Amino acid sequence: MGLDGMVVLVTGGSRGIGRAVVEQFAAEGATLVVHFRADRRAAQDTLAVLPAGDHMAVQADVADPERCARSSERSSIRWAE
């Protein structure tokens, strides 16, 4: 069973293990939201290797709930309730 139609947020998804997780979810058909804290270039590089889709990168400090909320507002992410 693939992940077509699913949106997956991977925190720390721009490098290392997080990037490998992002690539695997994308290979299964998911649309990815790649979180990064500071290295925008690494996040853009990660997006560049994914199959075509509506993938996006979002910058946030996930230790700060207020910053997470602001990031989701700026990026048009709509969280399930």
Image (cartoon, helix red, strand yellow):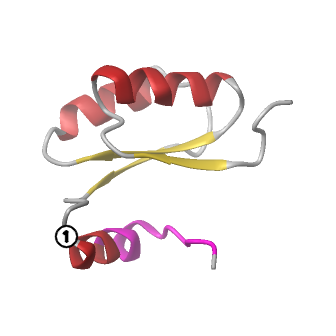
In which quadrant of the rendered view does residue 68 lie?
bottom left
Q: Answer above or below: position of 16 versus 2.
A: above
Residue tagged by mark 1? 64
Q: Who's the residue at 78% across and 39% down the image?
A: 4
Counting every numbered tag in the picture gives 1
Q: Quadrant of the C terminus?
A: bottom right
Q: Secondary structure at mark 1?
A: loop
Q: Measuring from the top left, give residue 21's x and y in whole percent.
A: 48, 27
The boundaries of the magenta stretch are 71-80
Which class describes the residues within 10 Å of circle 1: few (<14), some (14-19), or many (20+)?
few
User: Quick one: quadrant of the N terminus?
Assistant: top right
Q: Is residue 58 above or below residue 36?
A: below
Q: Is 75 a magenta residue?
A: yes
- Expressed as whole percent of the image width and height from the top left, the position of residue 17 reads 35, 23
Query: In the image as oriented, which residue stretches furthest toward the right?
Result: 1
Left/right of residue 1 with respect to residue 19 in the rendered view: right
